Amino acid sequence: MTKAILAALAVLVLAATGAEARADDLVAAVLPSSRSGVVNKPVTVFATLINTSGSDATGCTVTTSQAGLTLDFQATDPTTNQPVGKANAPVAIANGQAQAFLLTFTASTTMQAVDVPLTFDCTGLAAAPIVSGLDTLLLTIADTEPADIIALALTPSHDGVVSTGSETGTGAFVVASIDIGAGEAITVTPNTGDLTNLPVTLTICQTDRGGACMATPAASVTTTYQTLSTATFAVFVTAGGAVPFDPATTRVFVTFTDGNNVVRGKTSVALDVPVTASTTPVTPGGIYVGVLRITSSPAFPQPVAAMVSEDGEFHLLPGKSITSFSKPILRETLQLNFVPTLTLTATGNAYAAGDSVTAETGAVTATGVFSPHHSLVLDFTDGTETGTLSLNYVAGLYQQPSSLAQLAGEQTLHDEAGNTVGMISIMADGTFSGTTMLSSNATACDVSGAFTIIDPNFSVVRLTENIAACGSAAATSFTGLAETQTVGSETALITEVSNPTAALANLTTPDQMKMGNNN
């Protein structure tokens, strides 16, 4: 019975995500979405793959690139969920049809809360997008048996979607769980995943056999499991603003963590907050921080930052002053076009990161959704690569006044790696001149340009920059944005500018400031 329920819920997850949110050849889901196990002992989950390509598919397989992990897959009968055929044998899936699989993972080493990427692929088709929490597995492997919570969520509509009914309404769903591992005290918490700034309030309570709360709903609840013991919960979702329906990314997760804050179980549902488009202000401007996930190939998520003007000019930042990166990230310059339903389209360019000036890597198109002054989601395509940017609005960085007087003075230029690359002098009218060093040229080049205020209530300002021909480098011009940050009595800027062939990033600080003050 449990296997049949898991298979059915996996299909419901796909019905609420892939077909409505994306136009992909293949879409996939995994249930349960997390497991905990022991080194060299198999751990199993179920998966469903739907062929949405428009033609019949052959050679369909499931693989992973995760080091230290062996994955075996086997097709299952859709009515009984019992394995059929041979292990690791590719299967055919007719157009519009689904195939369920049993996935068996065996780890040769310990792993702690690794979001294992899975590649669901068929011959000649684009692989299913790798969407964290939907067709990945959050896996923890220990030397001794840990708690292992299998959790399933059920919504009143039985379609994997919890609805609040309005921008201020409340919805609810239930979660059933069983611990098939060691007994342990577990804290159960609802959350919104990468989009930590969605305008919703989440509470949870443990329920009795009749479905009634055993205590007043709170932000989390802790209960002690014994091996094979069960527990049920009710989760309440109250909206406090617009959240456009994007079931692959706007979701409510429920995580089960142990005393060491290691995730031992996880489940989720899509979130639906019906938007009153006519009364919702469409103001995309802001400073955003969040996560970049590549969906076209296995890749670990990367922290990112972006700044957006009130008219939708978008610059993905190296992010030196907002958060620390272990390596440079992809940079994008886009023009976002919003509509009152809080959806968007975008076009622009992507640039390879790593140098102060970088060559263009390709044209970018994107679609997305946003919750004003809360979150921004972009699903982008850059050549053959696809990805998702899940970003959270940071009021403290954006809602600072800007003025040309703030910017005036002698400023030191740093590249995205923190190296000093030049000096400029900014006049009271926003114009500037000075020198800068290009990575392709050891010569100090003359630079000039101007800052202009977009809205004096916000920290993002517009920037034009011209670099004169010097050494082997030709003259070039850039346009873009700068973000002002006040640190004590001083103002720092993060600038990101681009043209059709290159991008340039700088952290501009007054001489007496240390760069560490802006990290």
Image (cartoon, rainbow, N blue to C red):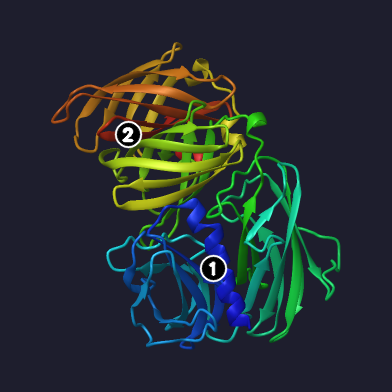
| Residue 408 image offset from top left, x and y in percent | 46, 17
| Secondary structure type for disc 1 | helix
Find residue 11 and name its label: 1
Number of other residues with Cα within 10 Å of mark 2, as a class: few under 14, some 14 to 19, many 20 or more: many
Horizontal side, residue 396 vs residue 38: left or right: right
Question: Quick one: label 1, few (<14), some, or many (20+) residues within 10 Å?
Answer: many
* Amino acid at dot 2: Leu
In the orientation shown, which residue stands out farthest toward the left? 472
The image shows residue 204, relative to residue 310, as above or below, that is: below
Q: Residue at x 41, y 36 (%)?
A: 346
Position above or below: 313 against 245: above
Q: Secondary structure at mark 2?
A: strand
In the image, residue 325 lies at what x, y percent?
43, 51
Q: Is residue 109 above or below residue 277?
A: below
Dot 1 or dot 2: first in sequence order is: 1
459 is higher (above) or lower (below) than 36: above
Quadrant of image for the N terminus: bottom right
Q: Which amino acid type is shown beneath numbered disc 1?
A: Val
Q: Which residue is labeled 2 in the image?
A: 504
Q: CA distance from mark 1 to mark 2?
A: 46 Å
**Residue 374 in the image, given as x and y percentages of width and height:** 61, 40
Horizontal and vertical percent position of residue 426: 41, 18
Q: Nearer the viewer, residue 3 or 129?
A: 3
What residue is rendered at 41% in x and 21% in y? 410
Residue at the spot 79% in from the left edge and 59% down from the top edge:
218
For the residue pair 84 and 95, the one nearer the viewer reads as: 95
* Foreground: disc 1 or disc 2: 1
Instruction: Name the residue nearer the viewer: 124 or 427.
Output: 124
